[in-house]
Amino acid sequence: MRRWLIALFVYLVAKRKRQPVFDEHGRIVEPKPPSPRAELLVVALLGAAAALAFAFVVVYATNANTQLFGLTLGGSLACLCAASVVTAKKLLPDEEDEEEYSAPAHPEEVEEIERLLDESGQTITRSRLLKLAAGGAGAALGAALVVPAFSVGPVLDTDRLFRTPWRSGRRLVDAQGRPIRVDEITERSFVTAFPEGADHKLIGSPVVVVRVPVKELDLPPGREDWAPDGRVAYSKICTHAGCAVSLYRSPNFAPQSPKRALVCPCHYSTFDVARGADVIFGPAGRPLPQLPLRVDDEGHLVAGGDFSEGVGPSWWGARQR
Amino acid sequence: MTAAALLAALVLAAPAPASEGRALYEEGCVECHGLSREGVDGIGPSLQNVSQGTVDFYLSTGRMPLDKPGNQPLRRKPIYPPEQIAALVAYLGSDEPIPHPDPARGDVARGFKLYTEWCAGCHQVVARGGAMPRALIPPLLEATPTQIAEAVRSGPWAMPRFDAEQLDDRQLNDVIRYILYARDPDDRGGWSLGNVGPIPEGMVAWLLAGIALVLVARVIGKRLER
């Protein structure tokens, strides 16, 4: 297969390598000496554009930093620009011909224009190589522009979007790994917790734990034993755009202060913690996934199972479970 | 008339802070918090069993008394002079004393981490405050270290409270040290733009880039004319 590809490449490059024909008499466009060096420069620049665009694909796939993304993609575009500039300045004739408009169907003039076009390109000796280089640069750049679309998420295997580190009996720990005791969660506190022993950076890891007075609690059916003494845990990742839900309204005088709610700082989606994190304001389309809580024999908070639904910004299959 | 004058003279003559606090309370606070501090249904919360720090916070930042119940208490010039605030604290506050943080013993780097974890979600990493639905988040530019500690321990208005289990006194010193630093940070770029984050910085960048593009286009146009 590879040998066939190489053979095809060599064939395409070498096929019909014409000797330039310079018809010295009767020319319209001033003859311009061919400049193989400029052609090589253009090929080199197009090659560099292709290489940099390809480098972008590689860098993007290996999760390198954003400076490298900018450097490679920007460099590729800059090389393409430079190639265009060199082509325009050095390879194409810069003669400006003014011709009067005439009625169509004058065969001599049509022929003249055809010859004009034909002769304009005659100074280029390696048009095939140039076309190939331009095609390569275009293809690599196209790939560089398409590749980031894969970051939008998995297309076929969406099952892994439902996988989280939470299991029944797994303890809740704080950012330093210290287990959280149930009595630490009071009605005015706001605690971020993670699954013990799991990677805190997984999208399914962080939860917020707050306490709601039991008489205010109105969870969806089937979650009656998910909130020991009013302690509820919800995924900290907003279901709208995946920001960390880091604001908590905790009224110290319910009749006058705003209602108890979790708020996402990005677009102000507001979730009612007493009613299963129902959306009461903002662009989020579904509630925050709830994590069932239990208390173990030592008085620590543990998970009673996995989340009520898929964690993170919504996707087409988010409600399929 | 004479009885009232006598009473006033008595109140003024008696420097005992608790009784002075009681008089001030009955004059300025009963309407919303009730005669025996039990609160008024739907208007003002009970003040039985509030910490001294809570009382000092609301009064020393001018958040109380409130013009209209239901308004969010916001920082303004305190209504009461310091000695009257002390009297009200002595009268209203529980045994829990006013916190005395010592930011000089705090560590900026540790404070930055803790602040990012606990406070920056609402108050912004630059301590300039912000907003959420139905509540303003105050900036921390004028709060004294004591007031910051009081707010952390009591959770005013819609702010959660953080007790010593979550944030001990040493960590609180770190956090306050960081807040003091964030008021006047080292501006490595040289132009702080109010330290309110990436949006004004981005707008300035777009503006400058736009001007540069227009200038380049103009130069190219001039050259073509020749």
Image (tube, coloured by chain):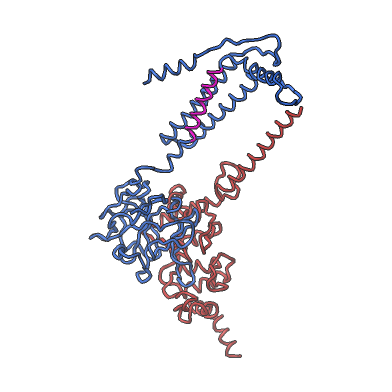
* In this view, A58 is above or below A180: above
Q: Position of residue A90 (x, y in %)?
A: 64, 19
Could you tell me what secondary structure mostly forms the magenta stretch?
Answer: helix
Q: Residue at x 46, y 15 (%)?
A: A11
- A28 and A157: which one is in front? A28
- B198 and A161: which one is in front? A161
A29 sits to left or right of A172: right
Q: Position of residue B144 (x, y in %)?
A: 52, 60
* In this view, A35 is above or below A207: above
- A105 and A111: which one is in front? A105
Q: Is residue B183 inside the magenta stretch?
A: no
- Kindly indicate which chain is depicted in red in the rendered structure: B
* In this view, A166 is above or below B160: above
B108 sits to left or right of A295: right
- B170 and A234: which one is in front? A234
Residue A91 seen from this side: yes
Q: Residue at x 65, y 12 (%)?
A: A33
Which residues lie in the magenta part? A127-145
Give the quarter of the figure containing the N terminus of chain B: bottom right
Residue A90 seen from this side: no
Q: Is residue A140 inside the magenta stretch?
A: yes
Q: Position of residue A222 (x, y in %)?
A: 30, 64
- Kindly indicate which chain is depicted in blue in the rendered structure: A
